[in-house]
Amino acid sequence: MAKTTTTKYDVAEHLRTPEEMVAYLEACLEEADGDAAFIAKALGDIARAKGMTQVARDAGLSRESLYKALSGERSPGFDTILKVVRALGLKLHAEAVRANC
C-alpha cells in the first residue's frame, strides 16, 4: 500500500489578491461569533500573505509584537486592530442587522 504524505495547509499561501483577502476576512467575521482572537488570527493570515515585515512597518509596530497580537492566542486591543487593518489596505464598515420579527 502506498504511503500518503500530507503537508500543513497555510491559508496565507492562497490569499493572493486584495479581493481574496477581503472575502477571507468577511467569511471569518461571519464565523467568529464574537471571538476577537479568531479575527486577530484571520488578520494575521492576511498579514503573512502580504508580508509581515511590511505590514508591521506600515502599522507602526514591531514585527514581533505584530506576530504576538495576531497569533490567535489572545485578543489584541482595538487600536492595534485598526492599525493593522489600515496597514493591510482594508477598511472596516458597519451594517445594520435586521431584528427578527
Image (spheres, rainbow, N blue to C red):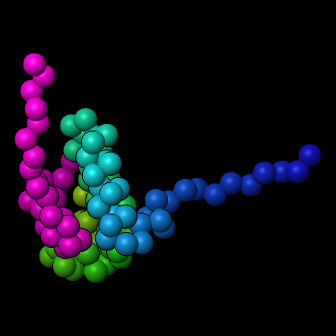
User: Could you tell whether 13 is left or right of 8 in the image?
Assistant: left
Q: Give residue 31's position: percent from left, percent from top.
A: 31, 40
Asked whether residue 96 is drawn in magenta, I would say: yes
Region of the chain picked out in magenta, as a range: 72-101
* Residue appearing at x 33%, y 57% in the figure: 23
Q: Give residue 85's position: percent from left, percent from top.
A: 18, 65
Query: Where, quadrant-wise, is the C terminus in this rendering?
Result: top left
Magenta segment main secondary structure: loop
* Residue appearing at x 35%, y 76% in the figure: 51
Where 82 sits versus 2, above or below?
Answer: below
Asked whether residue 43 is drawn in magenta, I would say: no
| Relative depth, front residue between 20 and 81 | 20
Q: Give residue 72's position: percent from left, percent from top.
A: 32, 50
Residue 53 lies in quadrant: bottom left
* Residue appearing at x 13%, y 22% in the figure: 100
Where 99 sits versus 64, above or below?
Answer: above
- Residue most toward the front? 101
Q: Is residue 37 visible?
A: no
Where 36 sits versus 14, above or below?
Answer: above
Residue 58 lies in quadrant: bottom left
Q: Give residue 30's position: percent from left, percent from top.
A: 27, 42
